[in-house]
Amino acid sequence: MKHHAHEFSVLAVYGGVPIHEQTRQLRRGVDIFVGTTGRVLDHMERGNLNFSQLKSLVLDEADVMLKLGFKEDVDRILSSVTSSAAAPQFLLFSATVPRWIKDLANGYLRPNWQMVDLAQDLKAKTQKNINHISINCPFHNRMQTLADILLIYGGLGQAIVFTSTKAEANSLLLSEKISQDIEVMHGDIAQSQREVTLKRFKEHKFSVLVATDVAARGLDIPNVDLVIQVEPPKETEAYIHRAGRTARAGKAGTCITFWTLKHKQQIRNIERAAGINFTPIGVPQPQDVIAATSKNTIKQLQTVKDDVLPLFDDAADALIAANDGDSRVALLKALAFISGCHKEALGQRSLLTGEEKHITYQLDLQTVLHGVGLVWNILRRVLPEAVVSQLKGMRALAAMNGAVFDVPEG
């Protein structure tokens, strides 16, 4: 236990920054040494490390570090440690411990090693105060839907959006649909810039961080209200680590996962393996977005300083006069303008795909369907062929007693 702030000297080493200052500190001696495998090996080759007095060795994120690609480096480091130090304590840490990790641990740990598991298997390894939500959204409507989800669920708080690739992360950064301040973090960005980005995010200098899994592990960001995954990860462990970026330190949080029909089985696998249940939601409607924007606007209005209000006396009087003296109407128009919904009439969006200017209808039947062919036949008997030909996205209800489909507006 540390008794005061400077009781132990701590050094963190990693690539992407000059090595000379790290070398100088190592030669002076440190009590706690933290490093990435690549930079640790670099210091070993330079003769900067002496493990003879090492008491404990910790391998964090063991399920990743012992996978192919890192395992060879870990083996080289451990070989050097065990040949130099007198039987140091060896600890493996990970939020997820698959069975193969337990088997592999036999090759690294002493006989009769102990397993401390705070949650058996993968069950309950996500925080209980995370609200897990899923949204079925076709790829071509994902960008607009993502922008709306950030407004509705993110509000004025902070959010992390996880993408599978660096290209996807960059495309979100360049999107004109997302109104919040946004920055990205992935493997192609220099370590020094990642540190600056992370520091700015913690200081609330911007509200949306878009990242690949480089940000899913090992980062303690305390005030993330919302995590969004633009598609479900293939491995449940990845979902758990991503979702775990919210609801830190006992706070509540929300994790929303986008999926399409091809991801349906992945969603089920995550639910089963992680012991969670997703709450399905539909694509946000314009009214939902406006309601959320209005709430955010009201919160922002509370930050206006009283001493600037007199500057707007004449403008307020003119606005009320332009609306026949009705101050409520004047206020409603001002809020509508600020919300950005004054430019065109509100349209509908498909509840199935989020496509603009489409309305979703549900047809209930008193019989059990064996497909949607019967529904098409019924519609053709009661509607003109010109109308039927424009219907989209026909699919049967789960109970097979009806169907839903989209109809273009007008």
Image (tube, rainbow, N blue to C red):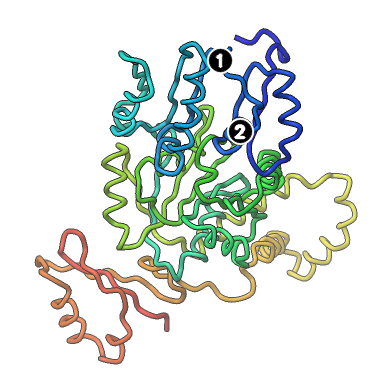
For the point 77% across and 71% down, the residue is 322
Provide the secondary structure element on which disc 1 rests. loop
For the point 57% across and 39% down, the residue is 38
Quarter-of-image position of residue 100: top left
Q: Which residue is mark 1?
A: 54
Query: Mark 1 or 2, which is nearer the eye?
Result: 2
Quarter of the rendering occupied by the C terminus: bottom left
Quarter of the rendering occupied by the N terminus: top right
Up/down of 351 relative to 94, above or below = below
Kind of residue indicated by mark 1: Leu
Provide the secondary structure element on which disc 2 rests. helix
Of mark 1 and mark 2, the one earlier in the sequence is 2
Q: Is residue 29 left or right of residue 386?
A: right
Kind of residue indicated by mark 2: Glu
Up/down of 320 relative to 308, above or below = below
User: In x, y percent, where is residue 397?
Assistant: 21, 63
Q: Is residue 219 left or right of residue 5?
A: left
Q: Is residue 25 left or right of residue 59?
A: right
Q: Which residue is mark 2?
A: 45
Quarter-of-image position of residue 200: top right
Tell me the crowding category of disc 1: few under 14, some 14 to 19, or many 20 or more residues within 10 angstroms, Cα based. Answer: some
- 35 and 312: which one is in front? 35
